[in-house]
Amino acid sequence: MRSEKHIIVKGKKYKKSPLKDSPRKRKLVKGLMKARRDVKTALDKKNAKSERNARNRVQKTGKVKPGSKAAKRRKSFCARSAGQMKKFPKAARDPNSRLRQARKRWKC
């Protein structure tokens, strides 16, 4: 009888939780797991939607006509950021630095 209230792991005795196998605990755990699943699916849907929106933004803003005002702005930004790359070589080496990410977005 005493062994039912304890569990032995690697030679050590541990007290079993009174809620271990009760129907109340099973119901609580089931509810929590369902809530976690619901949250996960909601987040997945949100992430998928934001990813689609980002992809659409990139497709819309990706192309500029050569010689246009936008192309000149891009060329100017690329020239300025190239100077920043020289000034901050540590950021220039790191592919996840803000500088490198901005240059990637501007297609420099």
Image: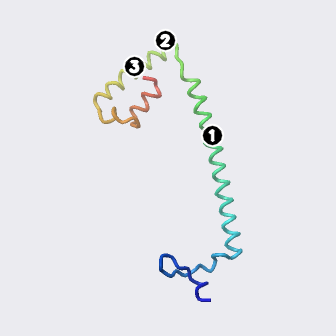
Name which quarter of the figure residue 92 lies in.
Answer: top left
What kind of residue is marked 3? Ser
Residue occupying the point 43% across, 32% down: 101
Name which quarter of the figure residue 3 lies in.
Answer: bottom right
Q: Compared with residue 96, is residue 32 higher up or lower down, i.e. above or below?
A: below
Query: Nearer the observer, disc 2 or disc 1?
Result: 1
Q: Which mark is residue 66?
A: 2
Q: Compared with residue 89, is residue 108 higher up or lower down, i.e. above or below?
A: above
Q: Residues within 10 Å of mark 1 (few under 14, many from 20)?
A: few
Tag 3 residue: 76
Tag 1 residue: 48
Instruction: Give the SS element for disc 3.
Output: helix
Residue 49 location (% of width, % of height): 64, 38
Residue occupying the point 66% across, 61% down: 33
State the CA–CA distance, disc 2 to disc 1. Answer: 33 Å
Residue occupying the point 64% across, 57% down: 36
What kind of residue is marked 1? Ala
Query: Nearer the observer, disc 1 or disc 3?
Result: 1
Q: Compared with residue 99, is residue 67 higher up or lower down, i.e. above or below?
A: above
